Image (spheres, grey):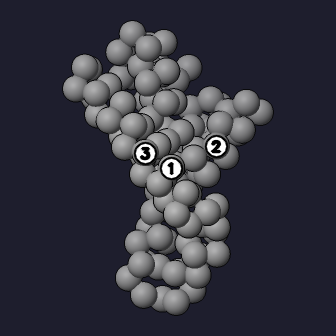
Amino acid sequence: MIPFRLFLLTCLVVIVGYTSVTIANHGWNLVPIFFGDMAAMGWPGQFNLEFFCFLLLSGLWVSWRGRFRPAALGLGVLAVFGGMLFLSIYLLIALSRSKGDMHQVLLGDRA
């Protein structure tokens, strides 16, 4: 479990750093660029569409894991908009609470 936790921490640190530089250089104006690339029907848009589907899947899984309770739905929305920044923190907390039991991490209360 230690390599997985190190992977999550590395992702978190790298994404925070990269995002900070990007915001400093380009501002918060992501949405028009993200969806504009999709509307252009090129490879950047294809990547964004596929990535957006992964974000939706992540949000659905987080909501399902919490049995679609109101708090879980809120976390699901955070998963969609927060991406790996959110998911790395969420998984680190889930790993800590489950003492590394991956069945518990993946299934939540259902394990």
- C-alpha distance separating marks 1 and 2: 19 Å
Q: Amino acid at mark 3?
A: Gly
Furthest-left residue in this view? 3
Furthest-front residue in this view? 25
- Between 30 and 2, which is closer to the camera in this rendering? 30
Mark 3 Cα within 10 Å, few/some/many (few <14, many 20+)? few
Quadrant holding the N terminus: top left
Q: Which residue is mark 2?
A: 78
Side of 51 relative to 74 (left or right): left
Question: Residue 100, image x and y in percent?
Answer: 35, 15
Mark 2 Cα within 10 Å, few/some/many (few <14, many 20+)? some
Query: In the image, which disc is placed on residue 38?
Result: none
Query: In the image, which disc is placed on residue 20?
Result: 1
Residue 68 seen by the camera: no
Which one is earlier in the sequence, the residue at label 1 or at label 2? 1
Question: Residue 96, image x and y in percent?
Answer: 44, 14
Check the image and report above or below for 3 versus 32: above
Residue at point 36% right, 16% down? 101
Marks 1,3: beta carbons within 8 A:
yes
Residue at point 61% right, 63% down? 27
- Between 72 and 12, which is closer to the camera in this rendering? 12
Q: Nearer the viewer, mark 1 or mark 2?
A: 1
Q: Helix or strand or loop: what does disc 2 sit on?
A: helix
Check the image and report above or below for 34 versus 27: below
Side of 75 relative to 43 (left or right): right
Marks 1,2: beta carbons within 8 A:
no
Check the image and report above or below for 94 versus 34: above
Question: Residue 63, image x and y in percent?
Answer: 62, 38
Q: Which quarter of the figure has residue 24?
A: bottom right
- C-alpha distance separating marks 1 and 3: 5 Å
